[in-house]
Amino acid sequence: MFNAEKTKNDIVDWIARWFEENGANCAAVVGISGGKDSSVVAALCAEALGRGRVVGVMMPNGVQSDIGAAESLADFLQIRRYTVNIRAAYDGILAEMDRAGIAATDQTRFNLPARLRMSALYAVSQSVNGRVANTCNLSEDYVGYSTRYGDSVGDFSPLSMLTVTEVRQIGRALGLPSALVDKTPADGLTGKTDEENLGFTYQVLDEYIRTGLCPDAKIREKIDHLHRVNQFKLKLMPSFLHID
């Protein structure tokens, strides 16, 4: 049975040790959206390092209707926060592509903000002596629900071996407000919830990941397909091995 309190404490210890080895005086830089994953990661880092060594970065693409949730997280944890609006960069790249005669696809428009946000996070991190936190969880990673070289990367990853269900339990163990822990997951890009985009619920996915059980054969087949075709996102870039 999953022990949220023990796991929370283990992650806190792991983060503290990682920073001792990889940035003893560095800050944890977290892109905060107000969703459960970034909220839990920021809270774990605050407990591991102290709130003075956690930097929250809000990165709206123009106007973000739910940015108040990210602001409330920063207030709750009492961490530094910055807002870096990526709209000018987003519009600029698409405009330059258009001038070059390249028609941006819908997928390009959906994924570009995630990649710009990661660029912004690393720019902030290098400027404040930081290390970038990855906020993906196991459920998302399992079916490839992330943007390669966007939210899929970072310097350390506290939640990548934990399902959505488990992340929520850790959020409660951390004492985070329910409005943050139980907020409906959405990518902030397509206008849909995660579950609408995936075609199944996280509850079903988490049960399948942990037990191998999924009563609906079509959903099981879809999960297996997404897992198979997205494996490349979790692997290092392949290199040609030259042997004389």
Image (cartoon, rainbow, N blue to C red):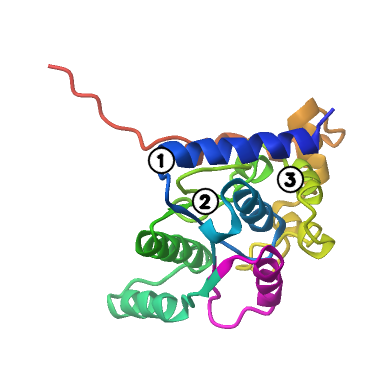
Label pair 3/2, CB-CB below 8 angstroms: no
Q: Is 7 left or right of 237, judged from the image as shown? A: right
Q: Which of marks 1 and 3 is nearer the N terminus?
A: 1
- Point out residue 194 in the picture as x, y percentages from the top left corner: 71, 57
Residue 142 lies in what quarter of the image? top right
Residue 175 in sight from this viewpoint? yes
- Point out residue 143 in the picture as x, y percentages from the top left corner: 63, 42
Q: In which quarter of the image is the N terminus?
A: top right
Q: Name the residue under label 2.
A: 133
Label pair 1/3, CB-CB below 8 angstroms: no
Residue 230 in sight from this viewpoint? no
**Does 66 lie within the magenta span?**
yes
**From mark 1 to mark 3, how far is it between C-alphas?**
25 Å
Callout 1: helix, strand or loop?
helix
**From mark 1 to mark 2, how far is it between C-alphas?**
13 Å
Callout 2: helix, strand or loop?
loop
Is 197 rendered above or below residue 190? above
Q: Which of marks 1 and 2 is nearer the N terminus?
A: 1
Query: Crowdedness of circle 1 by 10 Å Cα count: few (<14), some, many (20+)?
Result: few
Q: Give the range drawn in magenta.
A: 57-80
- Which of labels 1 and 2 is toward the front? 1
Q: How many labels does the image show?
A: 3
Q: Residue 22 carries which label?
A: 1
Q: What residue type is labelled 3?
A: Val
- Point out residue 119 in the picture as x, y percentages from the top left corner: 40, 62
Q: Which of marks 3 and 2 is nearer the N terminus?
A: 2
Q: Which mark is residue 114?
A: none
Q: Which amino acid does label 2 sit on?
A: Ala
Of residue 196 and residue 102, the one placed in the foreground of this image is 196
Q: Name the residue under label 3.
A: 167
Residue depicted at 69% across the width and 66% down the height: 73
Callout 3: helix, strand or loop?
helix
